[in-house]
Image (cartoon, helix red, strand yellow):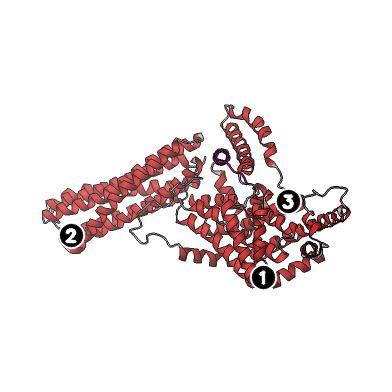
Amino acid sequence: MDYSILDLLGLLGAVGLFLFGMKVMSEGLQKVAGDRLRNVLSAMTRNRFTGVVTGVFITAFIQSSSASIVLVVSFVNAGMMTLNQSLAVIFGANLGTTFTTWIISLLGFKVEISAFAVPLMALATPLLFSKNGKRKSFGEFVFGFALLFLGLSMISDYVPDLQKNPEMFASLQQYASMGFGSILVFFLVGLLVTCIIQSSDATFAICLVMFAKGWVDFDLACAIVLGASLGTTITPLLASLSGNVAAKRAAMGHLTFNIVGCIWCLALFYPVISFISHLCVMFGEGDPNTLYNFVTHLQQTDPLIYNNLFDNTLPIDHPQYAKVTEASANVASMQAGASICLAIFYSSYKFLNLVINIWFTKLYVKAVEWVIPSRKKGDDDFGIKYIQGGLLSSSELNIAQAEKEIAVYAERVGRMIGMAQTLVHTPSGTDDFNKLLSRIEKYEDISDRMEIEIADYLNKTAQGRLSNEGKLKIAGMLNIISEIESIADCCYGIGKIMLRKADSRAEFNDDINKNIDTMYGYLDEAMHLMVENLNNIDNVNESQLMKSYNKEREINNMRNQLRSVNVSNINENKYTYQAGIYYMDVISDLERTGDYIINVADVIKGMFRRQ
């Protein structure tokens, strides 16, 4: 088979067109949907059964389980879908991919959606120049959709056409008489071929040709298809490499699901094949091995007819022409039934695997969490969690990732408030004091780095295609991370005050400590409300914001009260003047922390709260 450098470059260009189309379509869809996209996803995956239905229909529509599962992995990476929800969609996608195998079996080829690509571009072009943002975004979605399928069509043209060159697999016949060993060999063939071409549907088509030629019997054809179902997991695994832990777990869940399916099917292979054979007879398709037996018998008894059975090169005046024509007609009638039988096996296997495994979704979640544990645990889990962008990342999804990351950032900085409160009551000069102060300093330093990483990510996102709403959100989020970092600075500021207090040998009495703890209690509640709002940033209501404002007033009122009585307490010798200075420094620092917290609420109110 000839394959030139020019063909290879054409293939790379077709892949580039496909990826560009996917990017444009995804960004257009996200700008059209906006915040509604996450709500729709949440509704579609509210339980495992609706998640399965979602996976089936998405995969049946785009005719690629790999593409739909990669999409699910990207949603998990963005924090828009939980691992439990994603596995249900993945399970459904595995069943949805059988839709294409039935098209191949019934029609002999895929529906050429690419034929509509150029007309779709014609319809989308006027929308691209619309002044209305929604219409323009919808035009981008349609145009990207057309480019995607045009790229798929071109990839099909430039990929080495294995389906038209099944002779490459004719040599496998020598491994067809090894009993169950042959089953394993052909299972591996299906697995490897699918890993290379990354399409179980293409492998199914190749297998169908081999089966129709009579090169393999029904058992071996089923083994190839079974291997293909496992090989298709390679694409989501590759897509998850640049994602976070959750994305890797989703891809691993897909792999585990298919491994378990292959194990039980191989363990019960012959009973399963016997059951499928009975189904084929029941549906009127006959014995699946009729074609194989017929062709094998011809090969043994009449090599001339066998050799001319598929190429139609025998002259019309040849004495055997009538026999060859009759044999070809018989083979053609048997091929239709054989292809249906192969599709019945594939669909039955996928359906049974789904029915068996859907009840163990939670067990799958625990398994993949054990296989791929969190990289860090505990209070020192300071690191970027959601915003590792991969090849399929796009601007609107990046905003969702950043929102999740900011909520985690705030939660981690909130821990510093408790550390600072503990430091106030820890005797200075002790090992516990020094360790805790060092820990707060470390947290503040890492907080600075996290602010820079999130800000860089948001700035890069702002350079992509964004709706006006998305641009406003990025501006708001940049303000929020600045305020959160200032909270970390205030917590470290308490440590500096405690060091100065230790140097001057000043001491706080019980009343001072009690008042400081009361302020910390208000501050901790305010911080908790802020983190709660950030975790539900798109659905914050007026009552939640009012709680934050009320807590800020309590902090301010207490600061004013303590400041007003501080001088009289010093004059009455309740504590020293030096202690009173550091006491007020602590109270002022805590009040300033409260200001930064309420600044976040102001940003949420102005930029994110639903009207």
Residue density around tag 3, few if under 14, some if 14–19, many if 20 or more, within 10 Å:
some
Q: Earlier in the sequence, mark 1 or mark 3?
A: 3
Foreground pick, 325 / 145? 325
Image coordinates of residue 428 in percent, x first then y, are 16, 60
Q: Residue at x 81, y 57 (%)?
A: 305
Q: CA distance from mark 1 to mark 3?
A: 25 Å
**Closest to the observer, 300 or 569:** 300
What x and y, as percent, mark residue 62? 64, 47
In contact (CB < 8 Å): disc 1 and disc 3: no
User: For the residue carrying disc 2, how many other residues have a C-alpha within 10 Å: few (<14), some (14-19), or many (20+)?
Assistant: few
Q: Amino acid at mark 3?
A: Ile
Give 425 or 291, whichever is nearer the viewer.
291
Contact (CB < 8 A) between labels 1 and 2? no
Q: Nearer the viewer, mark 1 or mark 2?
A: 1
Asked if the stretch drawn in magenta spans residue 429, the answer is no
Q: Is residue 39 above or below residue 306?
A: above
Where does label 3 land, which residue? Answer: 103
- Over which residues does the magenta segment extend? 1-15
Mark 1 sits on what residue? 269
Looking at marks 1 and 2 on the same chain, the residue that comes earlier in the sequence is marked by 1
With respect to residue 147, does 66 lie above or below? below
